[in-house]
Amino acid sequence: MPADHLSAERRRRFWDRSAAGYDRQMQFAERYFLGDSRAWVCSQAAGRTLEVAIGTGLNLPFYPAGVQLAGVDLSPAMLALARHRAADLGRAVDLREGDALALPFPDSSFDTVVCTFGLCAVPDDGRAVAEAVRVLRPGGLLLLADHVEGAAWPVRVIQWLIEIVSVPLQGEHALRRPLRHVEAAGLEITRRERFKLGIVERLAARKPVAAS
């Protein structure tokens, strides 16, 4: 079955199995590719903040102290590790099981919505961005970081070859560009950086305030 059609339950089982080794698997990418992206994103969060696909809570140390933080993830095993990390840090976090494609919150619930290195692994990144925008209040800030399609065609060819294996195996996409969905949703890009041959992109975007 193609990865884009995997049920939420099958995706949940995959991430539950991956939870114990996830932090260790991320160490190489953190050191050589992702740079200070977690700090870049999380330091801009303010007010009531939602992190989508919070995973094991790797971002938790980087949020400002005054942020009122909630997090959702599809995987109970990932959330269990995030709870332990939050307790170790002494940080209060409202952690809930939930799907990025159908967030369990009303419209305009948050001042900031964060997602780092999660849109590459959801079946429909456009729908996930739309959900993030839905729960973001007018004037609120959307903060994203992810690995994306490379800037040069030889890089994109390599990514295409990687996807032949990674998409069916674990639903991991290499050729996405969340920026396009953010712009299509009408948000104003206020900060954007792209590096490592264009493979990593991070951005801040403001949701428009409706005209009175």
Image (cartoon, helix red, strand yellow):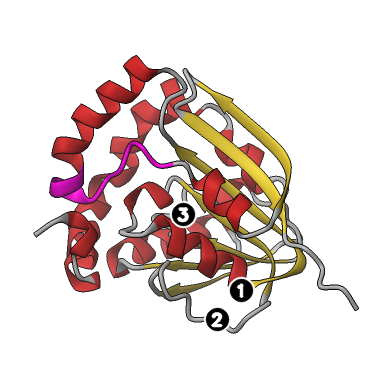
Q: Amino acid at mark 2?
A: Phe
The reply to whether residue 92 is visible in this rendering is: no
Task: Give x and y (percent) for residue 170.
Answer: 19, 49
Residue at position x 14%, y 37% from top?
165
Q: Nearer the viewer, residue 17 or 177?
A: 177
Mark 3–mark 2 distance (CA, rounded to whole Å): 20 Å
Q: Amino acid at mark 1?
A: Val
Please tell me in which quadrant of the rendered image residue 139 appears. bottom right
Please tell me in which quadrant of the rendered image residue 8 appears. bottom left
The reply to whether residue 100 is visible in this rendering is: yes
Residue at position x 54%, y 34% from top?
201
Task: Give x and y (percent) for residue 203.
Answer: 63, 41
Tell which tag, 3 or 2, sits nearer the viewer: 2
Q: Is residue 170 magenta?
A: yes
Tags 1 and 2 touching, CB below 8 Å = yes
Residue under label 3: 57
Q: Residue furthest left?
A: 1
Q: Secondary structure at mark 3?
A: loop
Lower position in the chain sequence, tag 3 or tag 1? 3
Residue 148 against residue 211 in the figure, above or below: above
Count the labels in the image: 3
Q: Residue furthest bottom?
A: 106
| Magenta stretch in the rendered image | 167-176
Residue under label 1: 135
Q: Is residue 76 magenta?
A: no
Lower position in the chain sequence, tag 1 or tag 2? 2
Residue under label 2: 105
Task: Give x and y (percent) for residue 210.
Answer: 81, 73
Mark 1–mark 2 distance (CA, rounded to whole Å): 7 Å
- In the picture, measured across the screen, residue 186 lies left or right of residue 195, that is right
